[in-house]
Image (tube, rainbow, N blue to C red):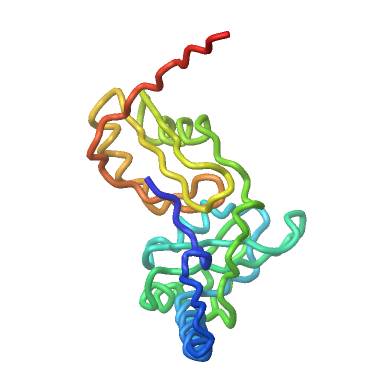
């Protein structure tokens, strides 16, 4: 399972000064493509969560990022939703007027891309968060290993269920929001190894 979101730090940094102009054009093209894959959602009821918003728009295509903005105590907020392809963004425009909470939302093509989040400012997702997420949706978890740290943008978890049905159900959770980001779930090729207790010698 890998948490998905835009990570500009993965792009290569080129030392060659002569290629700077080419790299700038490539970055501009990437940004323009990202804008075409993004929609702007306004008049968003304050009771609507990012999870519910992402689930609603997931019917249009794979959601790779969903960001609600504005004062959380305000009656109206706005959001940006980025899809994996331009087709998803075009399909999302048809959801304008859909009731979310107590108000119909407006959906327009976005004029900006979603800015990448510095992973240092992301809320930490704990092992208990992951366990609770899958047990609520899929069934009892027997073992779980959460790898990585809170500094890097990507973390990986291995989840083992008591019943095979739980693992099958978990595959349907791709795109759902855990913490603030959608998750990607794939079948594991290895069993979850139990954590060994370390013996500390004095």
Work out whether 163 lies above or below 7: above
Work out whether 143 lies above or below 6: above
Q: Residue furthest top?
A: 202
Image quarter in which the C terminus is found = top right
Q: Residue sitting at 36 percent across and 22 percent down? A: 194
Work out whether 78 lies above or below 56: below
Image quarter in which the N terminus is found = top left
* Left or right of residue 76: residue 202: left
Q: Residue sitting at 50 percent across and 90 percent down? A: 18
> How many numbered circles are shown?
0
**Relative image position of residue 54 (x, y in whole percent):** 48, 58
Residue sitting nearer the eye, 175 or 152: 152
**Relative image position of residue 92 (x, y in whole percent):** 44, 72
**Relative image position of residue 77 (x, y in whole percent):** 68, 64
Residue sitting nearer the eye, 19 or 163: 19
Q: Residue sitting at 62 percent across and 61 percent down? A: 68
Residue sitting nearer the eye, 38 or 75: 38
Work out whether 70 lies above or below 177: below
**Relative image position of residue 173 (x, y in whole percent):** 37, 46
Residue sitting nearer the eye, 152 or 122: 152
Image quadrant where residue 73 sits: bottom right
Image quadrant where residue 139 sits: top left
Q: Residue sitting at 26 percent across and 40 percent down? A: 188
């Amino acid at each position: 399972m890998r948490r998905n979101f835009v990570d500009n730090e993965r792009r290569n940094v080129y030392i060659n000064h002569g290629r700077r102009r080419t790299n700038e054009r490539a970055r501009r093209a990437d940004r323009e493509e990202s804008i075409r894959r993004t929609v702007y959602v306004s008049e968003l009821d304050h009771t609507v969560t990012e999870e519910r918003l992402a689930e609603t728009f997931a019917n249009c295509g794979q959601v790779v990022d969903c960001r609600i903005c504005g004062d959380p105590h305000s009656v109206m907020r706005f959001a940006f939703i980025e899809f994996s392809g331009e087709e998803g963004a075009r399909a999302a425009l048809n959801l304008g007027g859909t009731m979310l909470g107590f108000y119909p939302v407006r959906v327009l093509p976005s004029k900006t891309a979603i800015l990448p989040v510095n992973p240092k400012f992301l809320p930490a997702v704990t092992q208990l968060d992951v366990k609770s997420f899958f047990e609520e949706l899929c069934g009892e978890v027997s073992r779980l290993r959460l790898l990585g740290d809170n500094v890097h943008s990507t973390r990986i978890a291995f989840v083992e269920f008591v019943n095979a049905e739980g693992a099958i159900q978990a595959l349907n959770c791709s795109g759902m929001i855990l913490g603030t980001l959608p998750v990607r779930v794939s079948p594991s090729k290895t069993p979850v190894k139990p954590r060994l207790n370390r013996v500390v010698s004095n």
